[in-house]
Image (tube, rainbow, N blue to C red):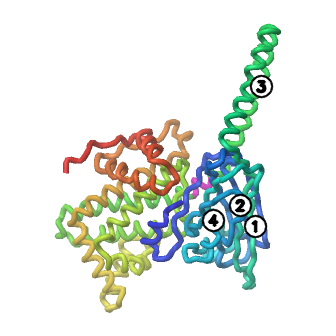
């Protein structure tokens, strides 16, 4: 998904955010390619559209044996169909694959590891059962290049006048003519026809629900894994960052321990975000609007945190290296011990930590901090909403948010940026916020 901004600023060259997986999507077409130890599976969210409509596809790449390197896209063969790939290879034409904008999907794909990338297809003309191909290339364990052509299709795209005409024909065939026959033949014949059509529709609906259920059963364990390992820790540390930095702000820089704890927890937040982006390339929620809104909020928070502190942007990558996202090396005691040691022996890292801490304490006294805490609060609120949405059948009721005014305002102010990515419309995002309990706050008086 167009999440490049977050990764560009946050990871200094790391893989960017991928767009999310629509967990409730009906999987209409699947193709699998296997080359040695690497399996690539392509999936479409639908196979029949009108000309000009967008089709979302996902490709899952899994390595079942020795490590492979430099997994990347090297081409798309889609006659009559334009395409838009997403970070880290955001290409829409053949020349782009040789450019620096097309980064490897994975620098190293370890044994037993898998990842997902996605993109959009848009039929530009009338096509029938047209197959699009995505060509992958990697370097195997022996240093040789292997390629995989992953099929996406068959795709059928019909011009809207033809769709309209087919609907008219189907109406005449399925409704108008039977009604006329029933009028002449009598109500018993009409009754039999109605029963037959009703049975057919019920059977089709049953099959559709069975497919959705099967898909959901397959995706639920994946969603649960992502929630426990990534989304829940990120949302939790965001809440702690707000609480600790509010406490430090209330002391006006006089409580050194509060300042150090606030500095640590903000650093831990960015470290966990980096770990998630490295593993998932972004967010994979059940609701597409939730993915885009959370990504836009994260990008905005990172921008506020660093925009007035260019030296902090330079120092962040090195400082993150002393923390692990989880476990004993992620805790405040381990962070402070490492910090004091580096400062004591006079290393470059110790100097960077001291300078960044001083800059952070000054930042807490600025208006930017108040804006950033609200944006971070909105990010945490909607991450929790989406990570819990998959458990609605367990809870027995739909998830809702009830953010305070500053957090709600930050969410609404992110709508335009989220819509500008092109995956969802501004109207859809507005409906999403209202539906989930985040009503638009009154206009600010300032």
Find disc 3 in the rendering and name its residue. Answer: 173
Choose mark 4 or mark 1, whichever is in front: 1
Lower position in the chain sequence, tag 1 or tag 3: 1
- Residue at (46% x, 73% y) in the render: 11
Lower position in the chain sequence, tag 3 or tag 4: 4
SS majority, magenta: helix
The answer for how far apart the CA atoms under marks 4 and 1 are is 17 Å
Find disc 2 in the rendering and name its residue. Answer: 78
Secondary structure type for disc 3: helix
Lower position in the chain sequence, tag 4 or tag 1: 4
Lower position in the chain sequence, tag 2 or tag 1: 2
**Residue 14 vertical position relative to residue 340 in the rendered view, above or below:** above
Query: Is residue 223 a member of the stretch shown in magenta?
Result: yes
* Observer-nearest of 427 and 389: 427
Find disc 4 in the rendering and name its residue. Answer: 115
Instruction: Find residue 350 and report its horizontal and vertical position in percent.
Output: 33, 85
The answer for how far apart the CA atoms under marks 2 and 3 are is 35 Å
Which portion, as a residue range, is magenta?
221-225
Secondary structure type for disc 1: strand
- Residue at (79% x, 73% y) in the render: 36
Choose mark 2 or mark 4, whichever is in front: 2
- Residue at (30% x, 46% y) in the render: 404
The answer for how far apart the CA atoms under marks 2 and 1 are is 12 Å
């Amino acid at each position: 998904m167009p999440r490049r901004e977050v990764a560009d600023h946050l990871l200094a060259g790391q893989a960017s955010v991928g767009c999310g997986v629509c967990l409730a999507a009906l999987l209409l077409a699947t193709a699998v390619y296997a080359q040695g130890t690497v399996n690539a599976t392509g999936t479409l969210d639908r196979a029949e559209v009108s000309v000009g409509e967008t089709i979302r596809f996902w490709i899952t790449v899994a390595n079942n044996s020795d490590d492979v390197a430099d997994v990347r896209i090297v081409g798309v063969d889609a006659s009559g169909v334009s395409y838009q790939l997403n970070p880290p290879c955001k290409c829409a034409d053949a020349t782009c694959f040789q450019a620096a904008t097309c980064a490897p999907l994975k620098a190293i794909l370890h044994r037993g590891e898998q990842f997902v990338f996605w993109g959009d297809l848009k039929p530009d003309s009338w096509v029938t059962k047209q197959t699009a191909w995505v060509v992958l290339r990697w370097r195997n364990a022996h240093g040789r290049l292997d390629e995989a052509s992953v099929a996406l299709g068959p795709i059928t795209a019909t011009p809207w006048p033809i769709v309209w005409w087919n609907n008219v024909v189907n109406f005449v065939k399925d409704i108008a003519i039977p009604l006329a026959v029933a009028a002449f033949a009598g109500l018993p014949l009409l009754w039999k026809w109605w029963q037959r059509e009703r049975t057919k529709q019920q059977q089709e609906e049953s099959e559709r629900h069975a497919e959705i259920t099967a898909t959901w059963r397959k995706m639920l364990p994946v969603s649960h894994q992502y929630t426990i390992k990534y989304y829940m820790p990120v949302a939790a540390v965001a809440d702690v960052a707000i609480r600790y930095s509010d406490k430090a702000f209330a002391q006006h820089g006089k409580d050194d321990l509060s300042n150090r704890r606030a500095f640590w927890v903000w650093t831990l937040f960015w470290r966990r975000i980096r770990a998630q982006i490295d593993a998932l390339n972004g967010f994979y929620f059940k609701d597409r609007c939730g993915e885009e809104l959370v990504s836009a909020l994260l990008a905005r928070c990172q921008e506020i945190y660093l925009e007035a502190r260019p030296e902090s942007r330079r120092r962040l990558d090195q400082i993150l290296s002393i923390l692990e996202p989880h476990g004993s090396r992620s805790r405040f005691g381990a962070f402070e011990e490492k910090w004091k040691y580096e400062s004591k022996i006079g290393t470059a890292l110790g100097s960077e930590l001291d300078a960044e801490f001083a800059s952070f304490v000054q930042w807490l006294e600025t208006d930017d901090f108040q804006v950033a805490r609200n944006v971070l609060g909105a990010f945490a609120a909607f991450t929790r909403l989406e990570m819990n949405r998959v458990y609605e059948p367990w809870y027995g009721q739909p998830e809702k948010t009830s953010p305070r005014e500053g957090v709600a305002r930050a969410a609404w102010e992110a709508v335009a940026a989220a819509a500008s990515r092109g995956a969802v419309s501004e109207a859809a995002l507005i409906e999403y916020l209202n539906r989930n309990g985040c009503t638009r706050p009154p206009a600010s008086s300032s």
